[in-house]
Structure formats: structure tokens, C-alpha cells
């Protein structure tokens, strides 16, 4: 039972354009959402997060949008750069202690020059 | 800078062997986690620990055990390795945080385990 779903295994975007990565969740108890980025042969690194009390959080080129009624969040990267090519994981947590995260399957983003 | 290190980057073991994966963090984090990453499945939590000698099962604990004798070290043990445990294993750590807060998890580089 996949509680966090990233339905696009891969995405290809032209350099300079906007990249939009999507994530859906099923558990209404989730109240915090994160995006991690992973390069090959490295561990995931934290990118940006959003609390359920907000609908948008921005950090430089990265913006995360949360639609609680649709149980959907998205990560926007603009403008996309070649160094953004990586696998992006969406993750969610709730108030059950120890900050357990539930991850999606990941989306491989490729930025083409 | 937080540093999470894992004892091996690549490991090849035979079916039935006992396998130890070691993880060390240098930031005095209370929480430590073991995940496995498989194509199409993302990261799945195996076990986690929020204190020395404390452990909690994650989503897929079967076939694994853990040990946390010191705060900085969290070991994952495959009691009798099987081919379906071939995977990328990722260790992470985080601060305990206040109730209701979410602390960032910092990951190690991963250990790619092949069980033959």
C-alpha cells in the first residue's frame, strides 16, 4: 500500500524551462512534506519542505505547492539547470514520533541543454 | 556539516551469510534510520532508533535486525542473507526535535549489497 505516490518515473525538460514534479498521498494524517534530491552513488539530500498549515514554500529556484484537499503536492524548479538532473523523492511524515518519513518511488529528472 | 558514513560502498555476499552494515554519524543525532532503496519502490524504512539501545520496526523489518550500542553508531544485520535482500541500503540520522516538529534527515552515501 503506497501511501506516497510519484506517478511519473521520469521527466525530461529543456534547460531554462520550468520543471514540475508531482506527488500524491493518501494518508490524511500526514502533516509535513519534504522533497529530497539524489545523485547517483550519493545519499539523498534535503531540498525543501512544507508544513500542512501552508500551501506554498519558496527557496530560490525551488517552490513547493501543497493542495491538501486534493492530497497533492508539487515541486517547481525554475529555471531548470543541468545540475538539477537527479532523482527526486517526495516524502511525508505525521505526528507519530521519531520523525518517520514515508517516501514516494522517485522521479528521475533530466535537464537537456 | 553533518556527516553520515557507511562502512562499505559495495558488498558482495553469499546466500545464508550473516551480513553487517555499519553507519556512523558525527553530529550527536538522537535518531538513526535504515532504509533500502529499490527501483520503482523508492526508499522503504527497515528499522529506526531514537536512543541508544532503543529500536523500532519500520515498514519492512523481516529478515533484518539492528543494534545501537553507542549514540553515533547504528548497525543493520542481515541474519541470513537472501537474494531478495540485494538492494541499496541507506542510513540516515536526525535530531530528535520537539514534539510535532520535523527534523531534516541526513543520509549516508549508501551501501550497494549484492547477495549471490
Image (cartoon, rainbow, N blue to C red):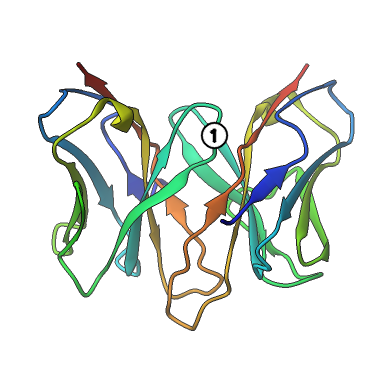
**Residue sitting at 89 percent across and 29 percent down?**
B17
Badge 1 density bin: few <14, some 14–19, many ≥20, Cα 10 Å: some
Relative placement, left or right, of A16 versus B23 is left
Q: Residue furthest front?
A: B1
Image coords of residue B107 (percent x, y): 57, 48
**Quadrant where the C terminus of chain B is found in the figure:** top right
Q: Is residue A78 above or below residue A64?
A: above
**Residue sitting at 61 percent across and 38 percent down?**
B109
The residue closer to the viewer here, A5 or B19, is B19
**Residue sitting at 49 percent across and 82 percent down?**
B98
Image coords of residue B100 (percent x, y): 43, 80
Image coords of residue B74 (percent x, y): 76, 55
Relative placement, left or right, of A89 versus B4 is left
Quarter-of-image position of residue A31 = bottom left
Residue B43 visible in the picture: yes
Residue named by callout 1: A42
Tell me the chain of label 1.
Answer: A
Amino acid at each position: 500500500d503506497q501511501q506516497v505516490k510519484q506517478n511519473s518515473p521520469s521527466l525530461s525538460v529543456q534547460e531554462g524551462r520550468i520543471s514540475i514534479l508531482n506527488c500524491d498521498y493518501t494518508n490524511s494524517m500526514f502533516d509535513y512534506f519534504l522533497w529530497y534530491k539524489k545523485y547517483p552513488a550519493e545519499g539523498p539530500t534535503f531540498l525543501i519542505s512544507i508544513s500542512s498549515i501552508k500551501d506554498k514554500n519558496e527557496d530560490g529556484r525551488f517552490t513547493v505547492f501543497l493542495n491538501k484537499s486534493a492530497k497533492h503536492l508539487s515541486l517547481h524548479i525554475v529555471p531548470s539547470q543541468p545540475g538539477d538532473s537527479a532523482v527526486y523523492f517526495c516524502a511525508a511524515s505525521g505526528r507519530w514520533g521519531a520523525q518517520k518519513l514515508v517516501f514516494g518511488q522517485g522521479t528521475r529528472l533530466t535537464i537537456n541543454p | 556539516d553533518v556527516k553520515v558514513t557507511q562502512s562499505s560502498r559495495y558488498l558482495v555476499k553469499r546466500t545464508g551469510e550473516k551480513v553487517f552494515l555499519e553507519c556512523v554519524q558525527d553530529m550527536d543525532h538522537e535518531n538513526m534510520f535504515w532504509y533500502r532503496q529499490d527501483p520503482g519502490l523508492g526508499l522503504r524504512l527497515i528499522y529506526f532508533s531514537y536512543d541508544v539501545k532503543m529500536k523500532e520496526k519500520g515498514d519492512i523489518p523481516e529478515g533484518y535486525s539492528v543494534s545501537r550500542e553507542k549514540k553515533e553508531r547504528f548497525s543493520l544485520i542481515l541474519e541470513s542473507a537472501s537474494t531478495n535482500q540485494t538492494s541499496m541500503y541507506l542510513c540516515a540520522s536526525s535530531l530528535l526535535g520537539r514534539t510535532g516538529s520535523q527534523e531534516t534527515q541526513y543520509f549516508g552515501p549508501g551501501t550497494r549489497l549484492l547477495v549471490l
